[in-house]
Image (cartoon, helix red, strand yellow):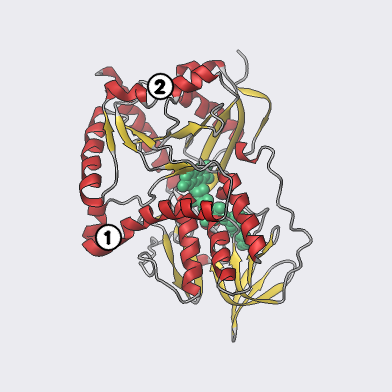
């Protein structure tokens, strides 16, 4: 049997193929700036752009090449990002706060479209719509009910697609119908990141890669941010490290749960096959607890298929055949093709499934996007920049950022939890297929 991995396959994101690496080796570190931002992904760069345009000298540090984190390796799917429902948030915060939190997701989606247009970033952004598939008939009924509530109470477009019409959306029988969110969008995440980098440099943000912040100390005039190359004095510090939040900010590390997410890219496929599998070019996700998310590449030649296929974190060489097997269960025609790229990155979950923006001991942060950070990281990065400039507060600002007793940042509970949820998802699918 031929290998499912193509000769010369890469353990690297498909998006990075042919993209020039950002060269900042010559950049000299200043002795002091108004703001140091730690992390050069969507959060850090959008905060930086806002700050320099507001007249603050700003340095963005990254431990690796800028963009090395999730911001060049994600699935490129943009939704309204806030996971807890309006009902659940209302129970906790009351209706008006709950509505304001939910609205952030909608604002973020509209805002990122404007940001991309105003910065003239060529990143294949399109309002392609999402098909959210139900993996059992029971989940379809729940989805249909939720869609009705979203339309009625939040003005969110959500179209119910019964199983017999599913092939107009997606060439598979693996789902029991689903819901289409026509406003959800897709982009090329690495091109978006690169466009942000260019805009930030052009606006005057200083960006230094391969330069980890190793210590943050409070001083009389602000902070001293230590790196292996120099110590920088800053009036303000923003931590924008999301799933890579480390020991220099232990308070934040205790509040985010780093979780690996994995993607494969197929070799180029025949046009007719792509047209049958993805007739409307939608992005796809589903109702499984351990969700699959997939889509056509922007040139409509490949399938990019993502999910979580092991209880423990694993190597892209090991995740590739497992994701391939799961993809082929959904699309049996893909058995005949190979994988050219397999990669992973670490997203950050929070214990209340909300993103968090705020200030602790004088240090600003925005993180915890729960796997949906393209628009929310961008938007909340911008908002944390605005906050330092003394402008508007976001509805999420100041929400308690919960942790759990004995949690220090190493999610020991994750492997058994993922194993259980994967087992339950599969059992539900098997049962549903037997009775279809
Ligand atoms: C496989 C995968 C698929 C995903 N798919 C989607 C999707 O389809 N849609 C969606 O909306 N979201 C998706 N996400 C999530 C999304 O990519 C992230 O939420 C978003 O990119 C977070 O951006 P960020 O700038 O906050 O963090 P990141 O882009 O992760 O950047 C954090 C940076 O901090 C740096 N850093 C850490 N510690 C230090 C230090 N001490 N000093 C200096 N630098 C440091 C790291 O090197 C890193 O570059 C996905 C993520 C993954 C991994």
Res. 259 in view: no
Residue at image location 42% in from the left, 48% down from the top: 413
**Above or below: residue 214 compared with residue 110:** below
**Above or below: residue 57 compared with residue 266:** below
Q: Mark 2 Cα within 10 Å, few/some/many (few <14, many 20+)? A: some
Residue at image location 26% in from the left, 37% down from the top: 143
Label annotation for residue 341: none
- Left or right of 54 on screen, residue 149: left
Q: Earlier in the sequence, mark 1 or mark 2?
A: 1
Q: Position of residue 418 (x, y in %)?
A: 41, 40
Counting the numbered discs, the total is 2
Query: Which residue ends up furthest to the top in the rendered image?
Result: 1
Label annotation for residue 171: 2
Kind of element beneath mark 1: helix
Q: Position of residue 381 (x, y in %)?
A: 50, 62
- Which residue bears the numbered disc 1? 98
Kind of element beneath mark 2: loop
Residue situated in front as seen by the camera: 180 or 125: 125
């Amino acid at each position: 049997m031929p290998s499912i991995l193509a000769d010369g396959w890469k353990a690297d994101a498909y998006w990075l193929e042919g993209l020039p690496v950002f060269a900042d080796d010559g950049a000299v570190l200043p002795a002091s700036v108004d703001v140091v931002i730690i992390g050069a992904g969507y959060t850090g760069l959008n905060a930086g752009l806002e700050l320099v345009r507001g007249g603050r000298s700003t340095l963005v540090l990254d431990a690796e090449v800028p963009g090395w984190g999730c911001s060049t390796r994600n699935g490129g799917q943009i939704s309204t990002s806030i996971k807890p429902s309006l009902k659940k948030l209302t129970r906790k915060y009351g209706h008006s706060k709950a509505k304001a939190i939910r609205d952030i997701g909608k604002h973020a989606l509209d805002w990122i479209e404007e940001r991309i247009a105003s910065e003239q970033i060529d990143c294949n952004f399109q309002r392609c719509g999402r098909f959210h598939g139900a993996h059992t008939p029971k989940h379809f009924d729940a989805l249909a009910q939720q869609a009705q509530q979203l339309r009625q109470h939040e003005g969110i477009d959500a179209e119910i697609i019964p199983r017999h019409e599913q092939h107009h959306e997606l060439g598979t029988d693996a789902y029991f119908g689903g819901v289409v969110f026509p406003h959800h969008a897709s982009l090329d995440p690495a091109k978006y990141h690169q466009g942000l980098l260019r805009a930030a440099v052009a606006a005057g943000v200083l960006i230094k890669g391969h330069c980890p912040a190793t210590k943050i100390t409070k001083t009389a005039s602000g902070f001293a941010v230590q790196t292996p190359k120099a110590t920088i004095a800053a009036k303000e510090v923003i931590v924008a490290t999301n799933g890579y939040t480390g020991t220099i900010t232990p308070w934040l590390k205790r509040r985010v749960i780093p979780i690996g997410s994995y993607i494969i890219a197929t070799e180029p496929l025949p046009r007719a096959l792509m047209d049958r599998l993805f007739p409307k070019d939608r992005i796809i996700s589903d109702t499984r607890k351990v969700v699959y998310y997939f889509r056509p590449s922007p040139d409509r030649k490949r399938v990019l298929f993502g999910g979580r296929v092991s209880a423990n974190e694993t190597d892209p060489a090991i995740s590739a055949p497992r994701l391939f097997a799961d993809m082929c269960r959904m699309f049996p025609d893909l058995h005949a093709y190979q994988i050219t790229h397999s990669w992973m990155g670490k997203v950050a979950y929070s214990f209340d499934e909300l993103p968090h923006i705020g200030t602790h001991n004088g240090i600003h942060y925005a993180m915890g996007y729960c796997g949906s950070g393209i628009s929310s990281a961008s938007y909340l990065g911008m908002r944390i920049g605005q906050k330092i400039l003394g402008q508007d507060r976001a509805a999420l600002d100041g929400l308690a950022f919960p942790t759990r007793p004995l949690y220090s940042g190493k999610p020991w509970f994750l492997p058994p939890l993922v194993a259980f949820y994967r087992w339950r998802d599969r059992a539900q699918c098997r049962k549903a297929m037997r009775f279809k």
